[in-house]
Amino acid sequence: MCKLAVLITSYNRSELFKKTLKSWLDREEVDTLIIKADSSKREEYEGYKEALEEIKGKSVVYEISDKRSGPTTAKNRVLEMALQNDCRFMIYADDDHYIPTESDVKGSLKILLNGSIGRNSFSR
């Protein structure tokens, strides 16, 4: 079971996605990255594929598509992927959302672990 997963969606912004991906990979509190990347251009598809294949040391679950699924469908898909991988806590992030400091992730995780907010239950 993963403790903290970051759910990232992206569409046609593989270069920006690479920077965001790096900021999340550097966080020791994050166990798993779950990614849904859509592209309408071959070079974007290849950019996503290249970035994801270079990841080492983290659990990564991803899906790359050569067509647009739309923001709602993409967010629903990463949530579904997280639930299939038994992720306990999840943070949604977009491809332009990076974490500048480690304390931001630690603070978010502390709030989630104390049970005061962010709890949701899903039946399977």
Image (cartoon, rainbow, N blue to C red):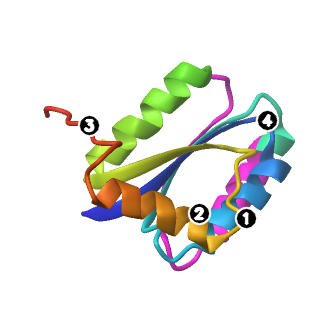
Return the residue found at the far front: 116
Q: Which residue is mark 2?
A: 104
Q: Given the image, on which type of amino acid does mark 1 rest?
A: Pro
Q: Is residue 25 left or right of residue 113?
A: right
Determine crowd level at label 4: few under 14, some 14-19, many 20+ residues with C-alpha closer than 10 A.
many
Quickly name the residue at label 3: 120
Mark 2 closeness class: few <14, some 14–19, many ≥20 residues within 10 Å: few
Is disc 3 placed on a helix, strand or loop?
loop
Tell me which label, 3 or 1, sits earlier in the chain. Answer: 1
- Residue at horizontal 54 percent and vertical 64 percent from the top: 105
Q: CA distance from mark 2 to mark 4?
A: 27 Å
The residue wearing badge 1 is 100
Distance of label 3 from label 4 (alpha carbons): 31 Å
Residue range of the region highlighted in magenta in the rendering: 45-69
Task: Kindly report the distance in space between the C-alpha atoms of the residues bearing marks 3 and 1.
Answer: 27 Å
Q: Which residue is mark 4?
A: 12
